[in-house]
Image (spheres, helix red, strand yellow):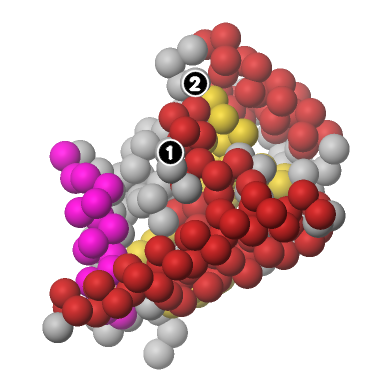
Amino acid sequence: MNGLTACWRSCRVLAHVLAGAWTVRVVFPRLSVAQKEERIQAWALELLARLAIKLIVKGVPAQAGPVLLASNHISWLDIMVLHAARHCRFVSKSELQHWPLVGTLATGAGTLYIERESRRDAMRVVHHMAECLRQGEVLAVFPEGTTGDGTQLLPFHANLLQAAISAQAPVQPVALHFADEATGAVSFAPCYIGDDTLVRSVWRTLSAKGVVAVLHFGTPQLAEGRDRRAWAADLRTTIQGLRGEVKLPG
């Protein structure tokens, strides 16, 4: 039965992805920035619905920029979950730009691409991020730099936080958590770590029942004299605390 459910969901998700790519290529050139953001958030919400994933938002997402969202990272789903709660521009690895369909959607959503192996490109992206923040945009990063299993946070990388320091913009900590709705336990279905493959992770997600994505938005904070490394350490502690406060309603 799970296999049949997964096949049905996969067909609906693929149709939604194709429709999204068509919208980006054909409709987006005629839309304003605000209209694009509304479409992206609505598309992300519908994607979660087609995956049968319930979204719970705790705290208050920043209503306007400039602000840099900093979240822990668990899955390929994380970007869609954050978009469903609040549109933002992500900083992602440059390879994503060339993925079929996914690259079209990511570019349409305003993703900033970075070559993670290049120190020079990292500096370029930090300067670009700072300029975007000065223009009042909402950006988002995953300071862990890679995905974890959802139980413990990895060390935070501080480089991209320099953009918020340079632009004197706040950072809003965000705790992301996937749970089983029936038990409240951590759901590992959407995880994408280690030797796992994207296909296997997607199939687990399509097959799973009762997955809840919980986003807990903390209070935006300014650097207040901290350098990027100290700020990254404090943000990690804050996000760890927000994750500890996660309780499913019921």
Residue drawn at 55 percent across, 71 percent down = 45
Residue drawn at 54 percent across, 25 percent down = 114
Q: Quadrant of the C terminus?
A: bottom left
Q: Residues within 10 Å of mark 1 (few under 14, many from 20)?
A: few
Residue type (three-letter) at the residue carrying disc 2? Glu
Residue 210 part of the magenta segment: yes
Q: Secondary structure at mark 1?
A: loop
Residue type (three-letter) at the residue carrying disc 1? Trp
Q: Say which of marks 1 and 2 sits in front.
A: 1
Residue drawn at 57 percent across, 9 percent down = 120
Q: Could you say which is closer to the camera, residue 223 or residue 8?
A: 8
Residue 100: quadrant of the picture: top left
Q: What residue sits right under mark 1 in the picture?
A: 99
Task: Give the spatial CA distance, label 1 vs label 2.
Answer: 15 Å
Left or right for 66, reference 58: right
Q: Residue 83 location in percent, x, y?
A: 58, 58
Label disc, if present, on residue 85 of the rendered structure: none
Q: Quadrant of the N terminus?
A: bottom left
Q: What residue sits right under mark 2 in the picture?
A: 115
- Magenta stretch? 195-213
Determine the residue located farthest toward the top in the rendered image: 120
Left or right for 173, reference 3: right
Q: Residues within 10 Å of mark 2 (few under 14, many from 20)?
A: some
Q: Residue 207 location in percent, x, y?
A: 23, 71
Determine the residue located farthest toward the bottom in the rendered image: 250
Q: Residue 188 location in percent, x, y?
A: 24, 61
Left or right for 97, reference 107: left
